[in-house]
Image (cartoon, rainbow, N blue to C red):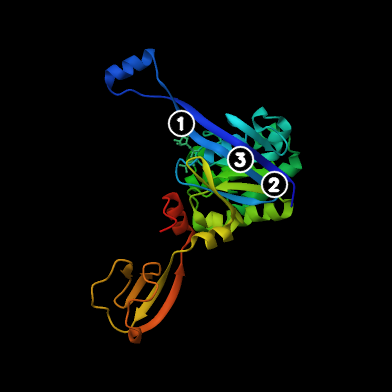
């Protein structure tokens, strides 16, 4: 196994917030005395990732994914447990550590809003002391691969969401990091550009053994890039293994697409969905044997659960259905 580059043990985190009282009187009283509230985001979380792995971090909204990436990239400290990334405590924000990681937060920009994106890239060049020739070669390569050579000279505020996300990706890759944390890297990105991003990340991974930890609600990102998936539910790790194992372990539910030579006129039972006049989707768990007269069946095709369907059941705690 390759060297472990991310090692979290027993990591917990709670956000401190203040309760907001209702009404004018409540707001007035809050001004003098506010009631503190703690929102748990991660609970006793363990994670070990080896160099060169591409890991997909999955979970419903509010599960704790962004919090974990914030902790691993040094934005916030954990409340307890130990966190080591490339042998550093991320929150110490040592320059040598920051040179080795790249981060993209789909919801938070590192681009300077009123200036062209190329100015932010030049600023990163200075901060990270990237040699001029190397910088121009890398920028040229990234901008060409992501098809944004034209737009990087326009003020960021005039760019579309997808163009901005691609520029954010350039920010996270321009330093040629050893590890990149990508929180929703395909937000607002069209299908053609998604393919370009996948190809680019795969190339970085293959040629320089770059480790990638990514979160996405777009399961295509995960299916295309990640071999391993980690699922978080309410701050707790629920699954950590290969994508293949997730698909086999949880695809206990499958459907049969059945075509008949005549319309089934008896009442459609629960567990059968009518797809067309003579096409039906049968839940194999509810019907271990097909509830149709075999002489009228023309075709039967098995439909396994998609990753989206598996995740839906896990997020809803219904995986035994
Ligand atoms: N700044 C904050 N202050 C208070 N609570 C927060 C803050 N940021 C996140 N939380 C809470 O912490 C929990 C975990 O949030 P987090 O952003 O890590 O989830 P997530 O898995 O990234 O969700 P999403 O898929 O919606 O981006 C949620 O309950 C969220 O409401």
Mark 1 residue's CB less than 8 Å from ligand 1: yes
Q: Residue 20 location, x and y as percent? A: 36, 24
Q: Residue 9 location, x and y as percent? A: 63, 38
For residue 204, above or below residue 295? above
For residue 281, above or below residue 62? below
Disc with the residue nearer the chain's start (1 vs 3): 1
Whole-number angstrom distance, CA of label 2 to CA of label 3: 17 Å
In this view, the mark in front (1 or 3): 1
Q: Is residue 194 visible?
A: no
Circle 2/circle 3 CB separation < 8 Å: no
Secondary element type, mark 1: strand
In this view, the mark in front (2 or 1): 1
Disc with the residue nearer the chain's start (2 vs 3): 3
Mark 2 residue crowding within 10 angstroms, few (<14) / some (14–19) / many (20+): some
Mark 2 residue's CB less than 8 Å from ligand 1: no
In front here: 134 or 220?
A: 220
Whole-number angstrom distance, CA of label 2 to CA of label 1: 41 Å
In front here: 300 or 181?
A: 300
Instruction: Tell me, for residue 39, which label it has, or none.
Output: 1
Disc with the residue nearer the chain's start (2 vs 1): 1
Whole-number angstrom distance, CA of label 1 to CA of label 3: 24 Å
Circle 2/circle 1 CB separation < 8 Å: no
Q: Residue 67 location, x and y as percent? A: 54, 37
The picture quadrant where one finds residue 227 is bottom right
Q: Is residue 270 visible?
A: yes
The residue at the far top in this view is: 32
Which residue is tagged 3? Answer: 103
In front here: 277 or 110?
A: 277
In this view, the mark in front (2 or 3): 3
Instruction: Tell me, for residue 138, which label it has, or none.
Output: 2
Residue located at (59% from left, 45% from top): 169
Secondary element type, mark 3: strand
């Amino acid at each position: 196994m390759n060297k472990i580059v991310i090692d979290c043990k027993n990591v917990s985190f709670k956000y401190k917030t203040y309760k907001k009282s209702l009404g004018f009187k409540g707001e007035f009283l809050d001004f003098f005395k506010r009631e503190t509230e703690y929102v748990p985001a991660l609970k006793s979380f363990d994670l070990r990732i080896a160099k060169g792995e591409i890991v997909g971090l999955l979970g419903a909204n509010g599960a704790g994914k962004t919090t974990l990436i914030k902790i691993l990239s040094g934005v916030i400290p954990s409340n307890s447990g130990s966190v080591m990334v490339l042998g550093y405590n991320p929150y110490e924000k040592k320059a040598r550590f920051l040179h080795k990681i790249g981060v993209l937060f789909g919801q938070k920009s590192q681009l300077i809003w009123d200036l062209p994106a190329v100015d932010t890239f030049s600023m990163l060049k200075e901060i990270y002391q990237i040699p001029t020739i190397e910088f121009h070669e890398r920028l040229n390569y990234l901008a060409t691969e992501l098809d944004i050579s034209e737009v990087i000279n326009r003020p960021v505020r005039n760019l579309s969401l997808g163009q901005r996300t691609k520029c954010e990706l350039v920010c996270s890759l321009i330093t040629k990091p050893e590890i990149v944390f990508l929180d929703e890297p395909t937000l607002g990105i069209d299908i053609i550009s998604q393919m370009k991003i996948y190809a680019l990340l795969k190339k970085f991974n293959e040629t320089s053994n770059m480790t990638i930890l990514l979160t996405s609600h777009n399961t295509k990102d995960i299916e295309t890039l990640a071999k391993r998936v980690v699922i978080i539910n309410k701050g707790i790790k629920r699954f950590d293994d290969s994508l293949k194992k997730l698909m086999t372990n949880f695809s206990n539910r499958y459907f049969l697409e059945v075509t008949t030579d005549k319309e089934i006129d008896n009442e459609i039972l629960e567990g059968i969905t009518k797809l067309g006049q003579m096409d039906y989707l049968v839940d194999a768990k509810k019907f271990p044997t097909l509830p149709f007269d075999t002489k009228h069946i023309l075709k039967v095709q098995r439909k396994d659960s998609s990753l989206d369907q598996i995740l839906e059941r896990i997020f809803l705690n219904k995986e035994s259905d």
